[in-house]
Image: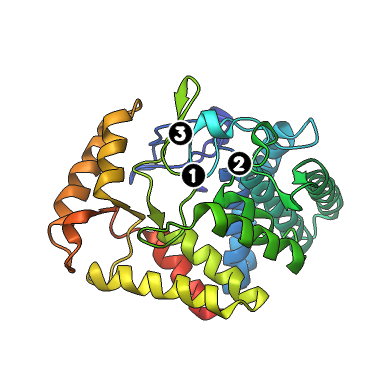
Amino acid sequence: MNKFAKIDNYKEIFHRYNVNGWPCVTRKDQNDNEGLVLHGIYDTYLHNKKHIFLENTWLLVKQIVGLIKDYSKTGLVKTERSIHEFYRLEHGYDIWVNCACCRGLYDAAEISKILNHYKENKEWRKKAEELEKNIKKKLFDKKLGIFMKNPRFKGIPDISQIAPFYFDIEHSKQKLKKTLNYLQKYLWHKGIGGFRRFRQFETVEDWHWYTGGSGSWCVFTAFAARFYKKIGDKKSYNECLDWLKKVASRTNGLLPEHISTRYEYENWKTHEIEFNQRIINETKKAENLAKKFKGEDKRKLIYWATPLGWSHAEYILLHKE
């Protein structure tokens, strides 16, 4: 990232780069990336404790903070896309983006303090505190008692509503419990188990809810398990953990991105309006992999992107905590 970000040219951190460092994206302007990289830099330092590492990334840190400041001139970070990479659902003031960038600013402030850049430390911490205050004021649904995905879609369930807790911005166990209850009510897949990322396939006015085949996501089920553990809900925690183990047992120990029923998969293929070559390649891989996995119901399920690094990382963190 330090070598290839080229923020002066691109004015953003991209969601993907290829092995040679060139931007390799399907969609631009996904502004949670900036906060995630800042968080990653600081988190890496916490593990290696090497000042030289922070010194070598200092210019990158300053440039990324500059981007976040540009995106948040209205008090909240404005984005075109977020965790799901879907413009129609996420453009505007998205909860995941704002929480990621808020965490990134706090971490950048800590980096500046370690490197004795006191002016930046004071300025960036103040900016992080202002952003946190606006998140809790403007992205909180008082009626439901939980954070909203996006002010344009109040009351619409989305796994990213867990973002304030994921990025350690909110610490209220009462709000966390309400959030988990709300997400479980609307997003737990009653057919195959596991958490969806948002509501299953449906048509909404003149556009459809892009779901990538709908289904249940390993990474998001691991999210939920971690937070069930925090509130002491052993029953729900074990339900999530058992589901993840069941998935791994069917896939030779590998965790996919997400799983859908064959019906959901075919429904998605019929109605999808954004096919590109990457998605077409993924559908072929998913169909071929489904033939190899274990279990009597392997013909009824489709396993996407197997293995997925993020799913495995969240599973490991779940056990470490």
Does residue 292 appear to the left or right of 248 in the view shown? left
The kind of residue on which mark 3 rests is: Trp
Q: Are marks 3 and 1 in contact (CB under 8 Å)?
A: yes
The quadrant of the picture occupied by the C terminus is bottom right
Q: Residue at x 86, y 49 (%)?
A: 126
Whole-angstrom CA distance, mark 3 to mark 2, is: 12 Å
Q: Residue at x 66, y 42 (%)?
A: 155
User: Label 3 neighbourhood size at 10 Å, few (<14), some (14-19), many (20+)?
Assistant: many
Please tell me whether mark 3 sits on a helix, a strand or a loop. Answer: loop
The kind of residue on which mark 1 rests is: Arg
Whole-angstrom CA distance, mark 3 to mark 1, is: 8 Å
Residue 229 image offset from top left, x and y in percent = 60, 76
Please tell me which residue lies in front, 165 or 176: 176
The kind of residue on which mark 2 rests is: Ile
Res 289 quadrant in image: bottom left
Residue 159 image offset from top left, x and y in percent = 55, 52
Q: What numbered label is drawn on residue 199?
A: 1
Residue 30 image offset from top left, x and y in percent = 54, 36
Please tell me whether mark 2 sits on a helix, a strand or a loop. Answer: loop
Q: Which residue is mark 2?
A: 156
Q: Are marks 2 and 1 in contact (CB under 8 Å)?
A: yes
Quick one: label 3 or label 1, which is nearer the N terminus?
Answer: 1
User: Label 1 neighbourhood size at 10 Å, few (<14), some (14-19), many (20+)?
Assistant: many
Q: Which residue is mark 3?
A: 209
